[in-house]
Amino acid sequence: MDTYDIAVVGGGPIGCFIAQQLASKGRQVAVLEEHKIIGEPIHCAGLVTKRVLDITKCSQDKIVQNTIYGAVIHSPDGSNLTIGGDKAHALVINRQKFDEHLAQKAETAGATILLNHKVITTKKQHPALTLDIQQNEQMTSIHCQLLIGADGAHSKIRDLYGFPKPIEMLHGISAELSDACLDPKYVHIFVGSTIAPGFFAWVIPTNHHGTNARIGLCIGKHHTHPLNHYFTTLLQQPLLQGTTIMKRFGGTIPLGPLKKTVNDRIMLVGDAAAQVKPTSGGGIYPGLLCATHCSMIAEDAFQKQRLDDEFLRRYHATWTKEIGRELTLGMRFRRIFNNLTDRQFNKYIEKLQKQKIIDIINTYGDIDYPSRLALPLLRTTPSLLSLAPALLKRVKQ
Ligand SMILES: Cc1cc2nc3c(=O)[nH]c(=O)nc-3n(C[C@H](O)[C@H](O)[C@H](O)COP(=O)(O)OP(=O)(O)OC[C@H]3O[C@@H](n4cnc5c(N)ncnc54)[C@H](O)[C@@H]3O)c2cc1C
């Protein structure tokens, strides 16, 4: 039976990044990935900031498909608000190429990537852990000292060890389109109960000509129709007339970061720990940030031979210190957003239609840190609060 220092369950971006970090310190690392190909199937719109490339030290070549300068927000009543346009705010990446690149970096650093290896169960057998793995019809096992669960939204490791569950699971549907006619610099966001109740829909140009796009939407708990109905509504938008669907895919976004992310010899990271921005559903940047803490504490734990819960809790403390407040504020904002009616969306979006406010959004808007916009926005537009007493109450909570 093969023995590793660390077994990382999940060969997504977060698992591969951690594997690379730990293998480069000389640790014996195995990444167990249930699929036969890294990066498939895709469950991602691929909209990130440059910080993602900076953390992973990936060059833009082949990974970045387009640069986004602004957004057009569509109200339920059909009016819209354009923000940005001044500078590059986000990048559109090819998720499969990004994941492949991170997997290659992990292998180059010395990690072993085991594809078509689905972890079925794990057992703690002091001093090691045993993982039972399914490979085609056959069962195999490996041993490890430390287990890192980077196995995504439906994490098996989270369930096996009784970790808390994310507060919410959003279900989404997306597609790659061709034959579009878009301004390549702008993404489009649609809000309201007829198109994406409880979240939003998006149209993201994926090439510099605006002819290809990635579109999709997620819905919250309270919806009156199946997901496909909302997808059809999105496709009927005038913006998407004449386009051709090339590929469709689904996915789940876990929201509400876990209050506990370690246990004796176990750490959870990325979507498995719901380290996801509640306002946008973006999980790559916060997952990578938390992954840097995870790999640092794991390495320290090996050096000090302290793989116990008490020592590993430092990981929970450090990632929470770095990004916990932003994610908690995001959840609070999400609760407010969830309670808005279509009429309120129309009103608020109309309120934002002033050059002074748009300037504030352009200056402070940051998709990784949306809370940085809240204070300057409320200072210039206190009427945003007075519009809905419920909003005021919730912000004070
Ligand atoms: C519709 C949609 C759009 C999104 N758009 C964006 C976006 O624009 N920007 C952004 O930042 N984020 C976006 N996200 C979120 C982003 O995709 C995730 O946050 C990111 O993929 C998390 O990476 P991860 O490595 O933690 O998990 P994953 O990418 O889910 O990887 C987990 C891996 O674990 C494997 N696995 C699971 N169970 C097992 C098992 N038992 N044994 C072996 N392997 C296993 C899976 O096959 C998978 O490869 C989107 C998500 C969805 C659903």
Image (tube, helix red, strand yellow):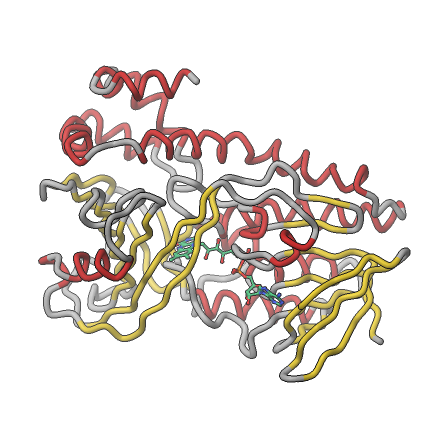
Closer to the camera, 368 or 156? Answer: 156
* Image-based side of 19 in relation to 255, left or right: right
Closer to the camera, 388 or 380? Answer: 388
* Image-based side of 250 in relation to 230, left or right: right
* Image-based side of 36 in relation to 108, left or right: left
**In the image, what residue occupies the spot 71% across and 67% down?**
109
Q: Residue 325 in the image: state x and y as whole percent.
A: 53, 29
Query: Which residue is most to the front?
Result: 224
User: Where 247 sits versus 280, above or below?
Assistant: below
User: Where 181 sits versus 91, above or below?
Assistant: below
Which of the 4 image quadrants contains residue 396?
top left
**In the image, what residue occupies the spot 59% across and 59% down?**
151
User: Where 83 sits versus 384, above or below?
Assistant: below
The tally of labels here is: 0
Closer to the camera, 394 or 242? Answer: 394
Q: Residue 296 in the image: state x and y as whole percent.
A: 73, 47
Q: Residue 66 in the image: state x and y as whole percent.
A: 32, 60
**In the image, what residue occupies the spot 46% across and 69% down?**
96
Which of the 4 image quadrants contains residue 311?
top right
Q: Residue 136 in the image: state x and y as whole percent.
A: 63, 83
Does residue 48 show up?
Answer: yes
Which of the 4 image quadrants contains residue 154?
bottom right
Q: Quadrant of the C terminus?
A: top left
Does residue 354 show up?
Answer: no
Closer to the camera, 178 or 68? Answer: 178
* Image-based side of 191 in relation to 134, left or right: left
Q: Quadrant of the N terminus?
A: bottom right
**In the image, what residue occupies the spot 48% across and 50% down?**
283
User: Where 358 sits versus 158, above or below?
Assistant: above
